[in-house]
Image (spheres, grey):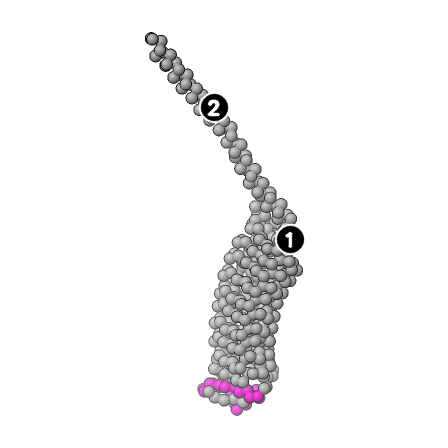
Amino acid sequence: MSDAPEHEHRLKAAMLHELKHSDKKKKHIASQKRPLLLLSIVIGVLLVAFLAWYISQLSYDYRISNGSVTITRYKGKEADVLIPSRILWFPVTEIGERAFWERADITSVILPEGITHIGDYAFGMCTGLREATLPDSLIEVAPGSFFNCAALLHIFIPDNVRIIGEKAFAGAGLTKIVIPDSVEAIGVSAFANCTALVSVTLGEGLTAIAVGTFSGCSSLRGVIIPDGVTEIGNRAFSNTGIRYVTISNSVTYIGVGAFEFCAGLESVLIPASVVEIGVGAFWGGVNLRGAFFEGNAPRIRHDVSSFNNAAPFTVFYRAGTTGWSNSWNGYPTKEY
């Protein structure tokens, strides 16, 4: 009976020893597994990166310069294109010139944040393109970027865009366009021949409306020229369907043929700030019956008619202004 406590003590000691040994074994096994776990994570990340790179290799040609990627050609088969934000860990910052040129099979494209520039004619002649999502990081829409994208009905221009290039959206199917206040310059014929375009909102950052900007927009119903614009370029709104135009008091020059062949225009108010009107500025406006001048008579280059000769057409001028007579440039005048 005296041996029983000693036996129990030895049994407990053996069990404790076994537990300690087991704990050490588990820690040893865990310590061996930890590097394997880290290695598997690294391999997983590398595999994902490789897969992304491999897919990009199948879909894009590109160049890497100064730590950023320019996509130079799309060679994928997807109609709905989601452009990657990174290739080989380098950020994609630019869509190169004609990168998607004449890809009529593309129906939508999403540009990721980080892209600042769309190259010349990058999506030109993508006649099946219906949707294009532009990132907030975008600064410039280059010449011809969406030239003749006839199926493109809507596009939102982000608030950081400063330049819209020549013919950027010419021939597109746009029905409405809002130019944000950040835009400082719009290139020649940027929206020319957008025959479905009905509504245009021009931003306060503009100082000029370029040559032919909205020429041929036959569905356009009206336009408000914002404060800050000093010049309406030659043929800027020629052959449009506008029925009204509001010209701000900052405009000093209305260009050659700026509103020619605008058959829906019945009258126009010329602010006192306008000092010169180009040849044929309102020529061909067959329903234009009156022009109301708020200031002194402006110069007309080469003394050639700026208004339609269709009768009856009358020039109205404010009492107290100068340069008017009973007949101004061949048109009858009347004080109002």
- Residue 312 colored in magenta in the image: yes
Which residue is label 2 attached to? 25
Q: In x, y percent, where is residue 149?
A: 61, 63
Position of the N terminus, as image quadrant, is top left
Pick out the residue farthest to the top: 2
Q: Amino acid at mark 1?
A: Lys
Q: Which residues are magenta?
A: 311-331
**In what element is the residue under mark 1?**
loop
Q: Amino acid at mark 2?
A: Lys
Residue 77 marker: 1
Look at the picture and state if 43 lies above or below 304: above
Look at the picture and state if 36 lies above or below 170: above
Q: In x, y percent, where is residue 259?
A: 57, 77
Instruction: Locate residue 254: give its quadrant.
Output: bottom right
Residue at 56%, 83% (x, y): give it. Answer: 287
Q: In x, y percent, where is residue 164?
A: 56, 64
Pick the front one: 171 or 107: 107
